Image (cartoon, rainbow, N blue to C red):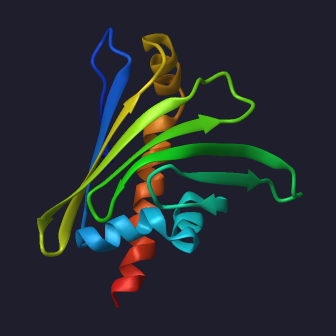
């Protein structure tokens, strides 16, 4: 099955571009990235903090069924333009991966369709390539599928 979320990574570079079209108006797609309750559902994580503003911050935490924390991530929101753009850092705690810079662009394609473009810059090409060796593409595609499914229910 072909993944709906596309990842483009040129050899020898330290960045990648992720694109996905959603059957959602751009306002609902953007809402899925800024409403803590919605983010928690499609990302499958606890949202400890989500300050949607310039110089705001965020913090996510995921636990296993026994309550042990298995994933923590945080970052700073450097630019926030409602329904258009979020520029942020992303750091996975207790991980070999350095902080990455993410540019999220939200655009309306049609009244009921929108597109998300994520441009992610890693500290090095090697770190980017390590990330791509993980089941990264399948994971983000699965998360975006959940986003579409969860937000579809909000449309009704």
What x and y, as percent, mark residue 117?
27, 46
Left/right placement of residue 150 relative to residue 103 reads right
Left/right placement of residue 45 relative to residue 16 reads right
Residue 84 versus residue 149 in the image, above or below: above
Q: Splitting the image into 4 quarters, where does residue 75 fall? A: top right
| Front one among 56 and 111 | 56
Residue at the spot 53% in from the left edge and 64% down from the top edge:
39
| Front one among 20 and 82 | 82
State which quarter of the image contains the C terminus.
bottom left
What x and y, as percent, mark residue 83?
28, 65
Residue at the spot 54% in from the left edge and 39% down from the top edge:
90
What x and y, as percent, mark residue 138?
46, 42
Residue at the spot 59% in from the left edge and 23% down from the top edge:
98
Residue at the spot 50% in from the left edge and 71% down from the top edge:
35
| Front one among 85 and 16 | 85
Residue 90 versus residue 33 in the image, above or below: above
Instruction: Report the residue that reaches farthest toward the top.
Output: 12
Left/right placement of residue 17 relative to residue 146 reads left
């Amino acid at each position: 099955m072909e993944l709906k979320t596309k990842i483009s990574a040129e050899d020898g570079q330290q960045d990648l571009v992720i694109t996905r079209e959603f059957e959602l108006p751009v306002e609902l797609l953007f809402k899925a990235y800024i409403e803590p309750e919605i983010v928690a559902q499609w990302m499958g994580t606890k949202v400890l903090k989500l300050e949607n503003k310039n110089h705001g911050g965020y913090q996510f935490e995921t636990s296993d069924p026994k309550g042990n924390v298995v994933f923590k991530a945080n970052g700073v929101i450097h630019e926030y333009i409602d329904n258009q753009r979020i520029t942020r850092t992303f750091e996975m705690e207790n991980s070999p991966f350095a902080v990455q810079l993410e540019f999220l662009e939200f655009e309306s394609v049609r009244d009921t369709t929108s597109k998300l473009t994520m441009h992610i810059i890693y500290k090095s090409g090697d770190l980017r390539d390590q990330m791509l060796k993980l089941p990264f593409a399948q994971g983000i595609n699965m998360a975006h599928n959940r986003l579409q499914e969860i937000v579809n229910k909000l449309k009704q």
